[in-house]
Image (cartoon, rainbow, N blue to C red):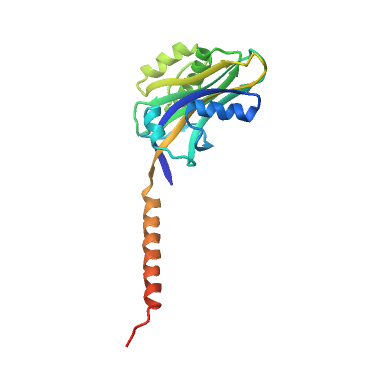
Amino acid sequence: MFTPKKMFFTKGVGVHKDKLASFELALRDAGIEKHNLVTVSSIMPPNCHVTSKEKGERMLHPGQIVFCVLARSETNEPNRLISASIGVARPSDENNYGYLSEHHAFGEVAKKTGEYAEDLAATMLATTLGIEFDSAKAWEEREQIYKASGNIFKTSNVTQSAEGNKDGLWTTVIALAVFCEYSMHKDVIAPLIKDEMQNKDNGNNANGAGAVSKS
């Protein structure tokens, strides 16, 4: 098995008469249109470091299968406000896992959508760490409680918003956490090396068996 050890965040918006094409243009705006994206759920792996978008993109190759957490919203209703956001909550102890949340909304400005996504991620992390809080309190109050506990190091969000095209073209917004570098687990690497060595030995034996000596 493998676990992501580096990731980056990006976002984009696309407009086109076709729904799928508007999504493609949003991917281009985000700089990840060259990859085959596979969406995963909401865990930020232990010891996974955030790098810049520019550095992360250089680690990927065209056609590569790339795992990501994706938030997406789209509309063809003129002037309708849409938004998509990824919330992040990182624990103080990097040996523990964090949370990534996806949220998409209609009629919300980017700030509200981003705060909601950030709240989701922080609350999920807080419950796993046993932090006591009142869910009825506003996000700003709970944010201070979470951070004051000493168990949550940082919360943040990346958010994209846009108004639906005035002529009724499809408008798509996306926000993503993209995993760009991985570490292989030892229990996976060892069997792979063993198989490779056995295949090489078998190949050498076959070549030796097929050799004909000349007198």
Q: Tell how many labels.
A: 0
Q: Residue at x 58, y 28 (%)?
A: 23
Q: Which residue lies furthest to the bottom in this view?
A: 215
Query: Considering depth in this image, is 205 or 145 the residue closer to the camera?
Result: 205
Residue 185 position (above or below residue 204): above
Q: Quadrant of the C terminus?
A: bottom left
Q: Is residue 48 visible?
A: yes
Q: Which residue is drawn at 37% across and 81% down?
A: 212
Residue 198 position (above or below residue 168): below
Which quadrant of the structure image shows residue 195?
bottom left
Residue 198 position (above or below residue 144): below
- Left or right placement of residue 66 versus residue 47 in this view: right
Query: Considering depth in this image, is 14 or 214 the residue closer to the camera?
Result: 214
Residue 193 position (above or below residue 65): below
Q: Residue furthest front?
A: 214
Image position, residue 85 (x, y; %)? 51, 22
Image position, residue 193 (x, y; %)? 36, 57
Q: Residue at x 33, y 85 (%)?
A: 214
Q: Is residue 50 visible?
A: no
Image position, residue 131 (x, y; %)? 42, 22
Image position, residue 169 (x, y; %)? 65, 20
Query: Considering depth in this image, is 166 or 42 the residue closer to the camera?
Result: 166
